Image (cartoon, rainbow, N blue to C red):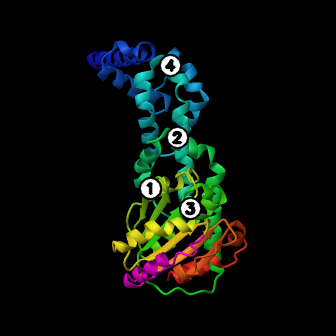
Amino acid sequence: MSSGINSIAVSQKMRTDIVRRVLTAPGEIPVHDREKGAEILIGMLLGKTGSDSMFPNTSFISSHKAWRYLRSKAEESDVMFSLVFEELFPLVVSAGPDMGASIFSSEERIKGYSELMDLLESIYPGQNFEDSSYSIYAAMSASRERIGRVMRRKEVLRWIAEIMMHCESEMIDSDKKTVPTKRDAVILADASGAMFGEPEIITKAVALSVAKRLMSGGRNVHVKIISRDGMVSFDFRSGKDFAEDFVNLITYSFGTDANIGFSEMFVPALALMKQGLWNGCDLIMISNGVGVRNNIRLAREWETYRRSGGIRTFSVSAGSDGVRGLTELSDSIYVMNDASITEKKGEYSRLISDLG
């Protein structure tokens, strides 16, 4: 018996010694011991393994506001504990005695992640996103700028969710019937300078609302953001884990370059249409810039490839009162701004009905 007790005592003494060295001089101990000490210390600070009372150096850390927040998040679920642990581990291993002052960035990342998860749950209630936790967190952690953007734009995120709620409410109140179809949908959205502010909110809300509704019917939705820097794609496929694409779309910055508008969007769209990539699809184009005027050649080519490819085209004017010059290039045109959606003017429900 005494041998067992002595063994436990020695083990505890070794653990204490390793953690003390992590707190005082992490660079002077082997990496393996440094990682072991970090693991023990984080467990203690998060309330999972023993008490940190034996380490006076940790009194500031464990009472630190950021630590208290991280500990409360870690207590929410095993998944959150794992994410908080993974966030803190490299910091504790490398920072040593300075870690108390170095955890604000960790708190910011976890807060940003929680904010997005809350938004995701509000937009797609009843879905189990626990399996997506790590991919969502990885998508956010890939860029400190993106985390900061999420934290600075909480009201923007809430505005997107609110617009989506109004879109859903409009569909519930609408008497328009949809005829089920299996056509994929492509949303081509302008992200140039003119789209900053309300147009960006409307674009993201409409794109996500359309994706949510069409996916529920087994359809795939491909969102393509276009600017002068090129094109970025996000896929919302029925049965696919789309959470990471959701995060990347919701945090993508609009309004960072010169204006494009509908007039310039139709050119790359036509090039892709000629390749047959969108044959049999519904193409939804979203912008608020000028329409196409006096370009007879473009109009003719557009009509030729649109008809031969069986492509239906819909144009959405986002955050404005309408755009001219789209009639010959679109099956239907919709004007959506904050007022028209919140007042349920019927433009969103008309779009969904036409996409049926």
Q: Give how far across and how far down residue 248 sits, in percent.
A: 47, 53
Span highlighted in magenta in the image: 291-310
Q: Is residue 325 left or right of residue 11?
A: right
For the residue pair 136 and 346, the one nearer the viewer reads as: 346
Task: Check disc 4 and give the amino acid type.
Answer: Asp
Q: Earlier in the sequence, mark 4 or mark 3?
A: 4
Q: Is residue 16 left or right of residue 318?
A: left
Q: Earlier in the sequence, mark 4 or mark 2?
A: 4
Which numbered dot is residue 145? 2
Task: Check disc 1 and give the amino acid type.
Answer: Gly
Q: Earlier in the sequence, mark 4 or mark 1?
A: 4
Q: Which residue is mark 1?
A: 230
For the residue pair 88 and 227, the one nearer the viewer reads as: 227
The reply to whether residue 167 is in sight is: yes
**Disc number lying in front (4 or 2):** 2
- CB under 8 Å between discs 2 and 3: no
Q: What secondary structure is found at the residue carrying circle 1?
A: strand
Q: Which residue is mark 3?
A: 204
Residue 322 lies in magenta, yes or no? no
- CB under 8 Å between discs 4 and 1: no
* Crowd tier of the residue under label 3, counting other residues whose Cα lies within 10 Å: few below 14, some 14–19, many 20 or above: many
Q: What secondary structure is found at the residue carrying circle 3?
A: helix
